[in-house]
Image: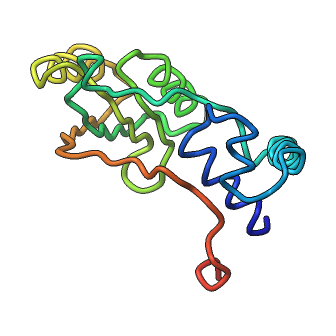
């Protein structure tokens, strides 16, 4: 990716709904070049789609938590099944398969701490394959607006 691709990517991450003409003007290139470069970023898999960002508090999901889960038996099938089950729950924001003492890390957003308690106790802790469930309430959550290539010195 060159500087033009990175500039296009930054602009689209800030506002994926801008017109191609607005994008081209902001980056300082011709609209045809902006369109060609954006299509190339999509075809190379750098841009995977365009999504609406939502305010979880306005959806009455102002309490966020990270839930770590240890799975038994320790097998690919058990972990993938748990991963898919957690990803399908409406409370889930993101699900990560991780290394260490836990197998899954689940980011959830719910209406209240009472809801979170009931969710963990009634829907997770009762599952026999979930041998350890730990919950950490998130006080503040900031999602970076932009992602780009790291500088060469950082990649080593």
Here the colouring is rainbow
Q: Is residue 135 above or below residue 82?
A: below
Between residue 14 and residue 119, name the one nearer to us. 14
Task: Say which residue appears at 30% left-offset and 37% top-offset.
Answer: 67
Asked whether, in this view, residue 119 is left or right of residue 52, the answer is left
Asked whether, in this view, residue 152 is left or right of residue 101, the answer is right
Between residue 63 and residue 35, name the one nearer to us. 35
Q: Quadrant of the C terminus?
A: bottom right
Q: Position of residue 101 (x, y in %)?
A: 37, 52
Q: Position of residue 2 (x, y in %)?
A: 79, 68
Q: Quadrant of the N terminus?
A: bottom right
Task: Say which residue appears at 21% left-offset and 43% top-offset.
Answer: 138
Q: Is residue 100 above or below residue 71?
A: below
Q: Is residue 10 above or below residue 20?
A: below
Q: Position of residue 55 (x, y in %)?
A: 34, 28
Which residue is most to the left?
A: 114
Between residue 6 and residue 87, name the one nearer to us. 6
Asked whether, in this view, residue 106 is left or right of residue 150, the answer is left
Q: Quadrant of residue 50?
A: top right
Task: Say which residue appears at 22% left-offset and 46% top-offset.
Answer: 140
Q: Position of residue 132 (x, y in %)?
A: 28, 37
Q: How many numbered tags mark residues here?
A: 0
Between residue 128 and residue 139, name the one nearer to us. 139
Task: Say which residue appears at 45% left-offset and 34% top-offset.
Answer: 94
């Amino acid at each position: 990716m060159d500087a033009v691709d990175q500039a296009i990517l930054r602009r689209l991450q800030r506002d994926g709904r801008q017109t191609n003409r607005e994008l081209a003007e902001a980056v300082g290139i011709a609209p045809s070049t902006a369109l060609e470069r954006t299509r190339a970023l999509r075809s190379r898999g750098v841009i995977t789609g365009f999504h609406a960002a939502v305010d979880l508090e306005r959806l009455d999901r102002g309490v966020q938590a990270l839930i770590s889960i240890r799975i038994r038996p320790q097998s690919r099938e058990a972990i993938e099944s748990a991963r898919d089950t957690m990803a399908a729950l409406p409370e889930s924001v993101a699900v990560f398969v991780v290394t260490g003492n836990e197998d899954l890390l689940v980011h959830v957003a719910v209406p209240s701490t009472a809801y979170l308690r009931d969710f963990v106790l009634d829907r997770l802790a009762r599952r026999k394959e979930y041998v350890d469930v730990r919950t950490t309430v998130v006080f503040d959550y900031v999602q970076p607006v932009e992602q780009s290539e790291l500088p060469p010195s950082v990649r080593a």
